[in-house]
Amino acid sequence: MELEIKIYAERVTSRKSVWWRSLVLILLFVTFAVVEGKANSSKFVNSYNLTRCNSTHLGLKTGRKLCRIHEHLRRINKPAIKSIQSPDGDIIDCIHSHKQPAFDHPLLKNHKIQDLPERPSKFRPAPVNRTSFSVHASQTWHLNGFCPEGTIPVRRTFAEDLMRADSPKKYGRKSHPTAKFDQKPDVNGNGHEHAIAYVQGEDYYGAKATINVWAPRIEGLNEFSLSQLWVLSGSFDGSDLNSIEAGWQVSPELYGDTRPRLFTYWTSDSYQDTGCYNLLCSGFVQTNNRIAIGAAIFPVSEFAGTQYDVTILIWKDPKEGNWWMEFADNTLVGYWPSELFTHLADHASMIEWGGEIVNTEAGGEHTSTQMGSGHFAEEGFGKSSYFRNLEIVDSDNSLRGVNSMLTLAEHTNCYNIQNRYNIDWNNHFYFGGPGSNPRCP
């Protein structure tokens, strides 16, 4: 199934010891299986005898590392009915929907996949912009096939993916913020910088926006750049924040490349022990067989050229109480069961839209990792990144426009944001920036 995307005319360079290099060689068999595109990745990983990973010739430290990687791959790469080699290098495994990672969660052992949710009533028909037209596009892996009905597409995790992380356990998880803050937007001084718009002060049951897609430059392996929406509830004191997130991101550490990719994230304890990106842990229940979370979005916007954007809606189904995600207006992707959450089991207390980067300050200077297009908000359409047609879902399960919103950017000489309004895009904003520059040293 093709997705309709609207077009508008307007970095581990850490030291590697000998044992680490030997680990890379030992794990080449896993990579070989990936390249060959074997259908059952879990079966292949399990073909390596676990007792061998403790062999004395490997060294104790290397052996233990290998065991952890092996076990983690076995756990998250489920048996596939079919595997698809994407032109961009990804392997997409078609997993039986009832065997997906979600059901490893202890709260979801007896979970029954929900029937179709009750969609929110429309705020108004999608605007017909005077300078827009529609075009069909698809995720890159679609060029080589689709997953059959009754399965879900899951981007396969490789051994080298886990080796980029501090440990297999930390792969696919955000760092726990160390800063404490009051009832303010989800920003902190943990190397993360933002340019966001937000609303608060009501009970929110969802949010929607259309975001244009770019391929920002990333300076360091441990940095990323993303554009997303946040659905939030709980206190911002670093202990019990609940968050549901979705958008696109460029993350060399997570994906091993610099392509913009569709992503999701969730947590119910302020990023401490719960939640993860995409399907890299149990929790999110996927129902769609054509959308691969973590797969590349293509094409991307061009500076002073064609603009590509995607629409994301997250809302709480009034029938079952689960939080659903819709992509490209009408495509249901799946849902976060209400059992995963504490505060979000009821409603959200804040919605955020915008960009985020990680600044590791390599060499003591601000990163040159770009946010959005890499250009400041004032440059406007075709040059800076945007969120348009911002909407929230109210207690009546109705979409309505955002009447007023606040904006925030920690370092406006590095990344900034400007909100605007017009009849076609309603409340919208431009945001982004280049990072390091003469005014952002």
Image (cartoon, rainbow, N blue to C red):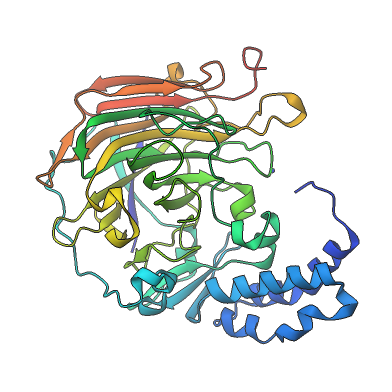
Percent from the top left, x then y, of residue 430?
A: 39, 25
Q: Residue at x 23, y 36 (%)?
A: 391
Give the residue furthest to the left: 396
Q: Residue at x 47, y 38 (%)?
A: 301
In the rendered view, does 61 fall on the left or right side of 367?
Answer: right
3 or 243, nearer to the observer: 243
Give the residue furthest to the top: 439
Percent from the top left, x then y, of residue 211?
A: 37, 38
| Image quadrant where residue 424 sits | top left
Which image quarter is the C terminus in? top right
157 or 193, nearer to the observer: 193
Tell me: residue 84, above or below residue 340. below
Tell me: residue 277, above or below residue 422. below
Percent from the top left, x then y, of residue 241?
A: 39, 43
In the rendered view, does 418 fall on the left or right side of 84?
Answer: left
| Image quadrant where residue 195 sits | top left
Tell me: residue 45, above or below residue 135. below
Q: Is residue 130 visible?
A: no
In the rendered view, does 180 fall on the left or right side of 234?
Answer: right
Q: Residue at x 33, y 20 (%)?
A: 419
Which image quarter is the N terminus in? bottom left
In the rendered view, does 429 fall on the left or right side of 56?
Answer: left
Q: Residue at x 79, y 46 (%)?
A: 13
Q: Is residue 234 visible?
A: yes
